[in-house]
Image (cartoon, rainbow, N blue to C red):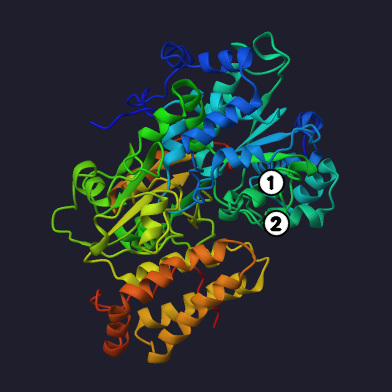
Amino acid sequence: MLPEELRQQLETRIAAAEDPREQAINVMFEVQRHYGYLTDEGVQEAAALLGMTPLELEELATFYDFIYREPVGRFVLHVCDGVVCWMFHDGSLFDYMCRKLGVCAGEVSADGMFTVLPTACIGYCDHAPAMVINGQFYGNLTPERIDEILEQVKTLPCDIVLCR
Amino acid sequence: MYEQVLFKNRRSGRPATIAEYRAGGGYQVLADVIREKSCADLIDCLKESGLRGRGGAGFPTWRKWSFVRPDAPHPRYIGANTDEMEPGTYKDRVLVNTDPHLIIEGIILAGYAIRAQKAFYFIRPTYEMDAELIEGEVRVAKEAGFLGDRILGSDFSFDIVVHRSAGRYICGEATAMVQAIMGKRAHPQKDVHMTDKGLWDRPTVVNNAETLACVPLIIKNGGAWFKGLARTPNAAGTKLYCISGKVNRPGCYELPMGIPFREILENVAGGMLPGSELKAFIPGGASTSYMPPKFLDVAMDDEGLQAVGHRFGTGAIMVFDQHSCMVAATLNLMEYFARESCGFCTPCREGFPYIRDLLWRIEKGEGKEEYITMLREMAGHMQKAYCAFAPGAAEPLRGLLEYFEAEIREHISQRRCPFKEQYRPYQELWYPPAEA
């Protein structure tokens, strides 16, 4: 169940919009932030708030890259697989991260910290190869730099996935 | 060296503040316009300037605005587009981080020109930091009286809200973006005139952020001035070119529209990386074709590229060198488009996975001669799709077939990728291993 405070906050937000559905993505982001991912229960609750059927909201939830309908780690490594990043590593950095964390795409690492996802060009081509973790860009990646970044983000204050 | 107008306030490491923007005459245009100019004056000025949309389609901005009938119902809306998911393109991100108030003033002026009440600033999720920046600067503009009720004491009231997307390429298409803002699945709408029936069936004008940022400059300095900034006679203004790939200084640069590719590559981007030779470049994002080095001197604008049978797109240049396998590069791009297709129409939904599969086999060393014909046929079928996504997405494939057919044949005859020592299964870790 969503806490009352969050529910009220979302209701206020929806009331201020031109149309409740306009807030569908923001509501999904907030619900996902609360649960750690967009749970089935979360879809039901969000749909009720938005005056949509759960199916209508599911149509949107499954359409977007940054709405997670399955559990994810606290940090989601959105690795750019745009052609410019590809030019520099041919997909090998993605493989490196998966091997290092012992996961396939979309799986959660054993410590619950990380999920790796291939992502449409993130718009950081001038620092290729690049990835985005919870809204923060990391560029000019090499295996060594990835090791550093993963160690560094583990220490960041982040109770739950920010799902940016 | 090159005249900087959009990037006049570019600073290292931080965006210009409202005070810095105003010190250069910012928001003075808005004040003047509200005091003494009509909507028609603005549109006339834009017409003279020759400004075309910077988001990829290159449609004349004044025409789009003039489609909104004076007696059209209210409320009316503006959509400012920073979805920017075209691979290779990051100009709007740089622009937002350079001079956010230039974009904000442009949005307000667009709102004034069509007498709109509200703008939606549509932004992709990887640009969350930029969304927060814009939100903050919109508040600052509101406090300064440039947004909100009765702007600068006039009868014009206007507001901007930031609309966060959750990440899907097709949302950058204007009609799909409108669907997305309304909380519907972002399928493009054909035969819908958004200037009549856009957001909630009200008149809506959607412009790219860079296009909107040009507006205050044009109104301030005049249409003829803007037109004169371009290098070629039929183009207009400056353009934020992004260049990335195997070059020494990748980045986003403001350059005169119509500048030859050679000048961008050699003078601006510092030439190819040591040991790299130019093999091909994509002139304007992944929805434009590869171009071989024989096009080095092409003028980088709509007309220049059209004249040689290519498209200008977003002006996001990607540079490939002799080590890039063009089959694998195209496979990467087709993988991208197969994933990003909205799935609404059959040619696009089914076609791109099919094309990807053919390329995958060729890259793997399992290609057959007839695949080339099949690829050519599939590229043709993509023209039959519902919206412009598939024809654009098929452009790199068209380029591969046109300029690098010999390389495809090499893959087929050698039964391997000639660029790799050993075949590495493509994206082997993307999917969990099949259960035994």
Residue ranking furthest to the top: B153
Q: Amino acid at mark 1?
A: Val
Question: Which quarter of the figure is the N terminus of chain A placed in?
Answer: top right
Question: Which quarter of the figure is the C terminus of chain A placed in?
Answer: top right
Secondary structure at badge 1 equals helix
Q: Is residue B376 left or right of residue B267?
A: right
Q: Is residue B393 above or below residue B36?
A: below
Q: Which residue is mark 2?
A: B189
Q: Which mark is residue B178?
A: 1
Q: Is residue A69 above or below residue A45?
A: below
Q: Is residue B116 left or right of residue B57?
A: right
Residue B140: percent from left, percent from top: 57, 16
| Chain of the residue under label 2 | B
Task: Please count the marks in the image.
Answer: 2
CA gap between label 1 and label 2 equals 9 Å
> Is residue A141 among the parts visible in the rendering?
no
Question: Contact (CB < 8 A) between labels 1 and 2?
Answer: yes
Q: Earlier in the sequence, mark 1 or mark 2?
A: 1
Q: Amino acid at mark 2?
A: Gln
For the point 65% across and 73% down, the residue is B346
For the point 56% across and 61% down, the residue is B389
Q: Is residue A140 above or below residue A158?
A: below
Labels 1 and 2 in the same subunit: yes
Residue A37: percent from left, percent from top: 65, 49
Residue B242: percent from left, percent from top: 36, 45
For the point 36% across and 79% down, the residue is B363
| Chain of the residue under label 1 | B
